[in-house]
Amino acid sequence: MVALTAYSYPFARLIDEAGADIILVGDSLGMVEHGRPDTTEVTLEEMVFHTRSVRRGVSSALLVSDLPFGSYESPDQALLSAHTLKNAGADAIKLEGGTEKAEVAAALVSEGFELMGHLGMLPQKIREEGRYRIKGKTETEKLSLLSDALAIQEAGAFSVVLELVTPPVAAEITASLHIPTIGIGSGSACTGEILVTYDLIGLTPWFKPGFVQPLANTGELVRSCVQDFCQRVRSRKKIQ
Ligand code: KIV
């Protein structure tokens, strides 16, 4: 199961045509697309805007949109937010959290939403936790991740993202669930893999997560095309 993020029509279309199974309009867009320090200020309106653009580019993959921070504090609020994303074109929605979000998750599933969970390092909790760190290093953390994963599965999620979970714990969670796990920085035992597309293609050289080996240097390619164009225009060389 291959999943990648997209926030715009051209990226959605290219990723869909290249054969990804899932395209996520992730709230990572707050950081990589809007230049904010974290994802906590992303609004539902922004998610709607980007989901609409992505929808126009996707014809085969499953389009999943993130419920942004603060938009699913209660089952009623979550239902309203999820309907808003669905109307913008989402096939499924994703939320962060385990046991504490099980009631919200179950309410969404019983309303008919396809739900993806997200456990491990939770970007929406960054201000609470202070830093990004690998989860599952202690026995207590491992047990709590396992029970969170089971709670989200029990609530009816069709899959769960495991972000920055130690590879042995990600493997144990994967073996304990009957729904697929989709790993990011969590080793190779998960059922599928997800990446922020810009990390995969090296579009944002100022931010390089340690667990990704970019397959291209697109940021440098953009810079050099622009430099070439500047040089051609300034020296009045023909470009068409
Ligand atoms: O927002 C996002 O892009 C995500 C992925 C990194 C899993 O949640």
Image (cartoon, rainbow, N blue to C red):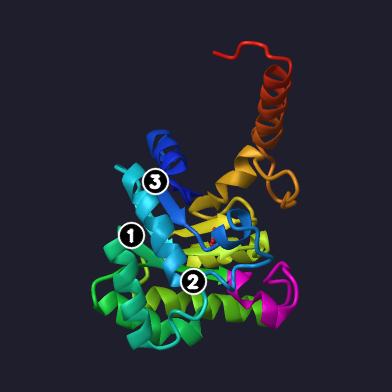
Q: Left of 202 or right of it: where is 158? A: left
* Ligand 1 within 8 angstroms of badge 3 C-beta: no
Q: Which residues are magenta?
A: 120-139
Q: Secondary structure at mark 3?
A: loop
Q: Which numbered disc flags the more N-terminal residue, 1 or 3?
A: 3
**Local crowd size for mark 3, using a 10 Å CA cut-off: few (<14), some (14–19), many (≥20):** some
User: What residue did someone put label 2 on?
Assistant: 43
Q: Position of residue 35 (x, y in %)?
A: 65, 58
Residue type, numbered disc 1: Ala
Name the residue beneath numbered marker 3.
Answer: 21
Q: Is mark 1 within 8 Å of ligand 1?
A: no
Residue 229 placement: quadrant: top right
Count of residue discs: 3
| Residue 159 picture quarter | bottom left
Q: Is residue 196 visible?
A: yes
Q: Amino acid at mark 2?
A: Thr
Residue at point 56% right, 57% down? 183
Provide the secondary structure element on which disc 1 rests.
loop
- Which mark, by number, is residue 90? 1
**Is 98 included in the stretch rendered in magenta?**
no
Among numbered discs 2 and 3, the one appearing first in the sequence: 3
Relative side of 171 to 53, left or right: right
Q: Would the CB of label 2 be found within 8 Å of ligand 1? A: no
* 28 is higher (above) or lower (below) than 221: below
